[in-house]
Image: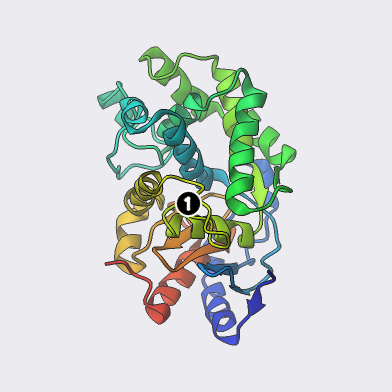
Amino acid sequence: MPCRTTDELNELVQEAKKYTDGGKVADYIPALAKANPEELSVAIFHDDGTCVSAGDIHQKLTLQSVSKVLTLALALIDYGEEAVFDKVGYEPTGDPFNSIVKLEFSPSKPLNPMINAGALAVTHMIKGKDADERFERILSFIQELAGNSSIGYSDEVAVSEYETSDLNRALCYFLKQHGVIDEDVEELLEVYTKQCAIEMDCLDLARIGCVFAMDGLEPVTNRRLIPAHVARLCKTFMVTCGMYNASGEFAVRVGIPAKSGVSGGIMGSVPNRFGIGILGPALDEKGNSIGGIKLLESMSAKYKMSMF
């Protein structure tokens, strides 16, 4: 079903675009440095399958850290809560998403699945005989959530990330030293960088957000894609840790489960109402889309989105 554009939503996008000058693209990953910092678009996918949008919603984005929510859901489906949280904790952190500091103090496991160390531990748990099979399981799961079998990944972004992953390598070796992971570090990084490079548009992202908003039910067919308790767990992490170390302020100002990525993508889930997909590559100092955050603040006020 095609998205319809609305003047009201377009006005909110144009107003939020004014803030993009204050951000910068994620140029530490060379392939992401090519993004247009002035881009800002949004799709809203409702529980009845209808969609509204503003901006170029068919512009592709790579999931980056948004993928952390999706691999967490898959790992929980595969292993259950007890096994997953034996490897990674529940607690938010005030440190940057790629920080190694907390591992020094609590080396037995990363604090939560939304920081890089925790996400690497979760990807380590994805079933499969080799890196290719594990990535294919992740990709197939995401295609099902989005209702789009044509979703793939950007080889350029994956290679760019893999070649500049020294900090993530350090995290992996730290995790391996303390028994959190027990596989070849390069194989894990191959899966993880491809996972982060999975590519879709705002409409796909909004549709996945709607699955979580509906506690794991596919919004058009009402088919269950994720167990309800898994979807709720993932949404809880989105609220407490999903916007990096700005999650507390985001909860106050916007008040919905959301997950951002350094490509400028944000996936939001307004419980029992709709999913949101945003692309805005200009990032603030925390790594969140600066225009996307402003847009969500305006949308939350206008559409009474806050769950609090």
> Circle 1 sits on which residue?
287
Determine if residue 26 is in view.
no
Is residue 176 shown above or below 264? above
The image position of residue 198, as x and y in percent, is 64, 43
Position of residue 125 in the picture relative to residue 38 (left or right) = left
The image position of residue 46, as x and y in percent, is 52, 69
* Quadrant containing the C terminus in the rendered view: bottom left
Mark 1 crowdedness (10 Å alpha carbons): few <14, some 14-19, many ≥20: many
Determine if residue 101 is in view.
yes
Is residue 27 shown above or below 273? above
The image position of residue 131, as x and y in percent, is 63, 23
Q: Nearer the viewer, residue 299 or 128?
A: 128
Residue type beneath disc 1:
Gly
Q: How many discs mark residues in the rendered view? A: 1
Position of residue 35 in the picture relative to residue 207 (left or right) = right
The image position of residue 134, as x and y in percent, is 60, 27
Which residue is pictured at 60% across the width and 86% down the height? 7
Q: Nearer the viewer, residue 86 or 240?
A: 86
Which residue is pictured at 41% across the width and 53% down the height? 243
Quarter of the image for residue 87 reads top left
Q: Secondary structure at mark 1?
A: loop
Which residue is pictured at 45% across the width and 65% down the height? 293
Q: Residue furthest bottom?
A: 7
